[in-house]
Image (tube, grey):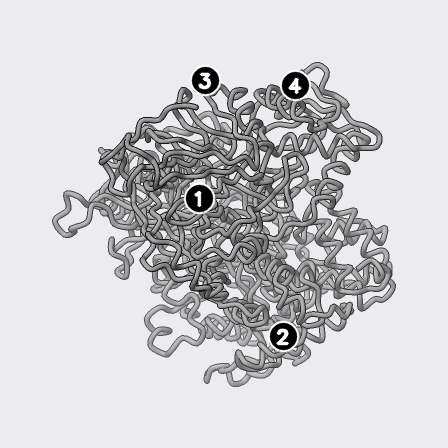
């Protein structure tokens, strides 16, 4: 167990749910009365989300508190590479592959960890006192976003909270799947990256077929297919889809993707035939690279190339002309609008916060209409598509 | 949709257009659409498919529109989908940057919307019928009913394209008329150049497709009162001699670009590889390019109303001579310029009385500046010979020229013409205050002859004769032998207050709809100012989702008249690369202070060097001035807001430019007036 001294000296806006908490969804008054005190959430912006009573930090850094990392994308891991954190085994491996050098306590999915919490609700006192009350139970559930991605389920005296991190259901086939806790979720913090009704994803298999057809058609025309996608998660999912091409294709992956692919394979994901990018041997193979390389000589100098942009944002046609892509494949790592509403309907939380949304107003409007108590938790994060 | 793949359904057209949209190669786009056209069996379907794709719900020539506003479409769609317009629809449209794409996605995704629709695989003629009903419906409520009735029987994709067609013109799928014409040629195995010509002559792409399909392209004839695409000029290329931008202006970075060397353009001729002797020169008027059709009012011109007010003094020819004026985008602007229509009708009325006299050339012409046409020694082609003997009611002529406010035989500043532009039915007072006249500089058709195919020098002789006979003013043309001549004429043009020079190749035909080197414009270099971005506006269409339009501010921090630091001086977009736009957008996000819908208010931080054609006084703006045709020259990452130009710089530039419009010496007037008192 890693030790965490407790301090309460951070800045950030504090959201407190009013007391008594109204359960506007189910109307079960019993649940309400069991919660003696409101649960506080501090939105730390780029430094994650802090729960003062539980003394937990989610996807953040800069606070001396047990820190849970939902997944290994750069906008969720601590900026301090030496920070001790908790994470799922695959996330731990991916973080190490990306250079995290601090201790990572691996928590397998479904296994509950007990933590001391703040020890008291009065901040500043009794830091190291007994923890008879105020202890906190934390469980990770697979989030379906990328390999290792987890939702953090926190049970406290003030109620239970599920923080989804980035999530996706139906889950990515190159992940551990998606699973919600059976227990009552009182509070939900859910990502809403694509929370507009213009976003509705096609079935995975349809999109995987598009990926495979794009690759095989380009190759048979003598062009080098280039799939532009984020190098952690989307890249491996695309490779996993290409692994079932008939006839088989070989893939090259650009730069930092190689180490990440090895982690995926260590965790049993089939990535097919692949190798690191090599200019000399690329012809006849598929190239996977992040869209930031579009202007690089690697892509620019390829005379016969065909470019596909693989991202949830590809569902907007205007992106095609902006990126000069030949094909747009709207495969997303995130929930679409309708999937988001379904998760809320399933969990029926007392209160829901939306995060990571360019415009949360529409989803909030729909949730309000269905009688949910909800609001926006403004966290500004980079968009990783 | 596949079950109907072989019927000429609208859905099938939309599938083809989707494929075209998703294809980047223009050759491939052409062959996709040609393949589709080839598969159509019915003439009516061919004509509609081509028209929907190229022109929209109605043919351009018909001048008709469905007359459904964007807001009506959006409100109807929101209602159809059962969503709130402000709360749900608008955020979605902001995200996509396109109303039609938003509506397509909502129609597809929202279960309520999907449940209301049952695709009926409408035919192309069903759509044509639907567009008719939309046009006939009056008021938002009726139009909503028609739209809803159609949408209930359409797929989301069909609805998207249908909405795009309502706004007439390009579908914005990277497939414009210039590609559709070769697709027609490819589909029906005919010559693409001929298809282009017939399209120009008929003005109807649907009809062009049918003639191509029937192998009857040769039968197409020019028709009066149907505009012909204008011949366009290329800018004179900047040669090694030019580019003297460090300039000799008298101070301030603002001055350098604007007044540094007014002759820079002309001086470049030597360096641009242009042989001056192949060209003639005319002064470039700062007016409104216009095509005038003059001919018998046979009443056979479809879709056009007769002149609302032929004027009291044209009584004897009223009902016989009809005039139509077309703007550069081929819109009929006749109703805006009754004085010009009157001028042209009156000119026709003069004809009979002059028929026995020899052509009388210009009161102000200097000997030698005119071409040999003045002795009327040109051998006219058959059909043109009887020009003067024709009755006024039977003359047919199409002229290319410029509308200008003309007073005392002098062209007045463009701003005065602007007061008339866009005013549909100008009142007596406005007409008297700013009298507009037509100045001719080219002749396209005359009494059934396609003069456009003659070389310029022959057209010019006919034009001069025509103007001499009718008393219409025309541009003065100058021989040039050297770059020095161009330089001299250019300076003279500026002294006259004109924009610069037009160089026209002697042996060129009238290249309708093309921008080639046959006409070159030598323009007074515009000015430039260093400004700061004050607001960023989210673009739509290709630029949707990014901030691509910008309101630029001029510095007034030391100006006692203003409390602000910067005030808007103009709005500009374009002129940056995609890469720069990305960088710009990153910086914009850092500088954003406030958001109003698609607009971001920014802290001063990005300096843009903006280029413009002219400065105009505009009292409705805070600055009191507006820039004409502002565009980005460069983003000055090296400059800070404190380095930008001030309003005082703008005022000084304006005065400098205004001073140059000195009085013209009538002996070298850029306009030839053939008969005193005509104006």
- Residue at mark 2: B148
Q: Position of residue A284 (x, y in %)?
A: 77, 23
Secondary structure found at label 3: loop
Q: Residue furthest top?
A: A280
- Residue at mark 1: A155
Residue at image coords 60%, 81%: B137
Nearest to the observer: residue B616 or residue A230: A230
**How much space separates mark 4 and mark 1, taking CA atoms?**
46 Å
The answer to whether any part of residue A351 appears in the image is: yes
Residue at image coords 27%, 35%: A10
Q: Earlier in the sequence, mark 4 or mark 3?
A: 3
User: Badges 4 and 1: C-beta atoms under 8 Å apart?
Assistant: no
- Residue at mark 4: A277
Chain ID at mark 1: A
Residue at image coords 61%, 38%: A324
**How much space separates mark 4 and mark 3, taking CA atoms?**
26 Å
């Amino acid at each position: 167990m890693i030790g965490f001294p407790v301090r309460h000296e951070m800045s950030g806006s504090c959201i407190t749910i009013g007391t008594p908490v109204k359960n506007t969804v189910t109307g079960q008054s019993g649940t309400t009365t069991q919660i003696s005190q409101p649960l506080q959430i501090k939105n730390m912006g780029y430094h994650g989300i802090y729960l003062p009573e539980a003394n937990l930090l989610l996807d953040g850094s800069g606070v001396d508190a047990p820190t849970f990392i939902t997944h290994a994308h750069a906008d969720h891991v601590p900026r301090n590479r030496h920070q001790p954190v908790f994470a799922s085994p695959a996330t731990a491996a991916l973080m190490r592959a990306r250079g995290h050098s601090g201790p990572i306590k691996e928590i397998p999915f479904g296994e509950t960890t007990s933590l001391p919490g703040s020890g008291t609700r009065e901040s500043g006192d009794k830091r190291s006192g007994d923890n008879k009350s105020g202890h906190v139970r934390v469980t990770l559930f697979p989030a379906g976003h990328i390999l290792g991605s987890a939702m953090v389920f926190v049970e406290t005296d003030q109620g239970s909270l599920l923080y989804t991190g980035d999530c996706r259901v139906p889950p990515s086939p190159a992940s551990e799947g998606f699973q919600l806790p059976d227990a009552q979720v009182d509070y939900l913090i859910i990502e809403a990256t694509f929370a507009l009704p213009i976003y509705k994803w096609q079935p995975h298999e349809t999109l995987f077929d598009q990926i495979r057809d794009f690759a095989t058609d380009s190759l048979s025309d003598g062009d080098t297919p280039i799939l532009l996608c984020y190098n952690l998660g989307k890249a491996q999912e695309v490779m996993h889809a290409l692994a079932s091409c008939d006839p088989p294709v070989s893939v090259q992956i650009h730069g930092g993707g190689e180490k990440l692919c090895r982690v995926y394979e260590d965790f049993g994901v089939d990535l097919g035939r692949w190798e690191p990018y090599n200019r000399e041997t690329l012809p006849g193979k598929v190239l996977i690279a992040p869209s930031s390389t579009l202007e690089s000589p690697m892509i620019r100098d390829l005379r016969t190339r065909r470019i596909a942009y693989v991202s949830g944002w590809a569902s907007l046609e205007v992106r095609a002309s902006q990126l000069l892509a030949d094909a747009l494949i709207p495969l997303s790592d995130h929930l679409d609008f309708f999937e988001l509403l379904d998760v809320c309907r399933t969990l029926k939380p007392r209160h829901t916060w939306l995060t990571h949304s360019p415009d949360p107003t529409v989803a909030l409007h729909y949730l309000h209409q269905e009688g949910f108590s909800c609001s926006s938790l403004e966290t500004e994060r980079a968009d990783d598509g | 949709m596949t079950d109907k793949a072989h019927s000429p359904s609208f859905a099938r057209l939309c599938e083809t257009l989707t494929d075209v949209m998703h294809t980047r190669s223009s050759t491939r786009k052409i062959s996709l659409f040609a393949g589709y056209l080839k598969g159509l069996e019915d003439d009516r379907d061919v004509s509609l498919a081509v028209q929907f794709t190229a022109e929209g719900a109605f043919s351009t020539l018909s001048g008709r529109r469905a007359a459904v506003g964007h807001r009506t479409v959006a409100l109807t769609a929101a209602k159809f989908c059962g969503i709130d317009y402000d709360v749900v629809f608008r955020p979605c449209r902001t995200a996509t940057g396109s109303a039609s794409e938003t509506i397509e996605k909502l129609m597809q995704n929202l279960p309520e919307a999907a449940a209301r629709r049952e695709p009926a695989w409408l035919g192309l003629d069903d759509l044509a019928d639907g567009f008719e009903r939309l046009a006939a419906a009056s008021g938002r409520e009726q139009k909503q009913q028609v739209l809803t009735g159609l949408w209930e029987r359409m797929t989301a994709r069909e609805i998207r394209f249908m909405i795009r067609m309502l706004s007439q013109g390009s579908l914005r799928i990277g497939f414009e008329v210039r590609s559709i014409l070769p697709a027609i040629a490819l589909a029906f195995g005919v010559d693409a150049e001929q298809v282009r010509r017939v399209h120009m002559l008929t003005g109807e792409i649907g009809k062009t497709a049918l003639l191509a399909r029937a192998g009857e392209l040769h039968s197409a004839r020019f028709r009066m009162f149907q505009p012909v695409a204008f011949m366009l000029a290329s800018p004179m290329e900047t040669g090694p001699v030019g580019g003297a931008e460090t300039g000799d202006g008298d101070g301030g970075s603002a001055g350098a670009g604007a007044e540094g060397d007014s002759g820079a353009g002309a001086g470049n001729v030597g360096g641009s590889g242009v042989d001056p002797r192949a060209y003639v020169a005319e002064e470039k008027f700062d007016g409104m390019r216009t095509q005038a059709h003059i001919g018998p009012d046979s009443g056979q011109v479809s879709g056009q109303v007769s002149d609302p007010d032929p004027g009291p003094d044209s009584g004897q020819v009223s009902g016989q001579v009809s005039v139509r004026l077309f703007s550069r985008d081929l819109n009929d602007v006749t109703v805006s310029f009754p004085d010009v229509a009157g001028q042209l009708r009156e000119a026709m009325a003069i004809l009979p009385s002059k028929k026995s006299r020899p052509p009388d050339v210009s009161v102000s012409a200097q000997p030698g500046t005119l071409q040999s046409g003045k002795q009327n020694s040109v051998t006219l082609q058959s059909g043109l010979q009887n020009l003067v003997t024709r009755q006024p009611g039977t003359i047919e002529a199409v002229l290319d020229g410029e509308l200008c406010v003309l007073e005392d035989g002098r062209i007045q500043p463009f701003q005065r013409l602007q007061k008339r532009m866009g005013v549909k039915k100008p009142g007596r007072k406005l007409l008297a205050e700013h009298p507009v006249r037509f100045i001719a500089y080219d002749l396209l058709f005359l009494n059934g002859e396609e003069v456009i195919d003659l070389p310029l020098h022959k057209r010019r002789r006919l034009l001069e004769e025509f103007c001499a006979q009718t008393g219409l003013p025309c541009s003065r043309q100058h021989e040039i032998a050297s770059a020095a001549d161009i330089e001299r004429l250019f300076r003279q043009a500026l002294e006259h207050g004109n924009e610069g020079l037009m160089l026209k190749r002697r042996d060129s035909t009238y290249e309708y709809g093309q921008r080639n080197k046959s006409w070159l414009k030598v323009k007074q270099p515009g000015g430039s100012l260093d400004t700061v971005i004050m607001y960023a506006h989210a673009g739509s269409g290709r630029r949707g989702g990014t901030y691509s339009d910008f309101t630029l501010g001029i510095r007034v921090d030391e100006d006692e008249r203003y409390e602000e630091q910067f005030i808007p001086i103009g709005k500009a977009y374009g002129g940056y690369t995609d890469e720069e736009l990305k960088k710009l957008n990153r910086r914009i996000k850092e500088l954003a202070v406030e958001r109003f819908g698609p607009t971001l208010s920014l802290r001063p931080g990005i300096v843009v060097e903006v280029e413009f054609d002219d400065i105009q006084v505009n009292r409705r703006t805070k600055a009191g001035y507006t820039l004409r045709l502002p565009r980005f020259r460069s983003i000055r990452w090296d400059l800070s807001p404190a380095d930008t130009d001030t309003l005082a710089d703008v005022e000084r530039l304006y005065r400098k430019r205004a001073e140059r419009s000195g009085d013209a010496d009538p002996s070298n007037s850029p306009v030839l007036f053939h008969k005193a008192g005509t104006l």
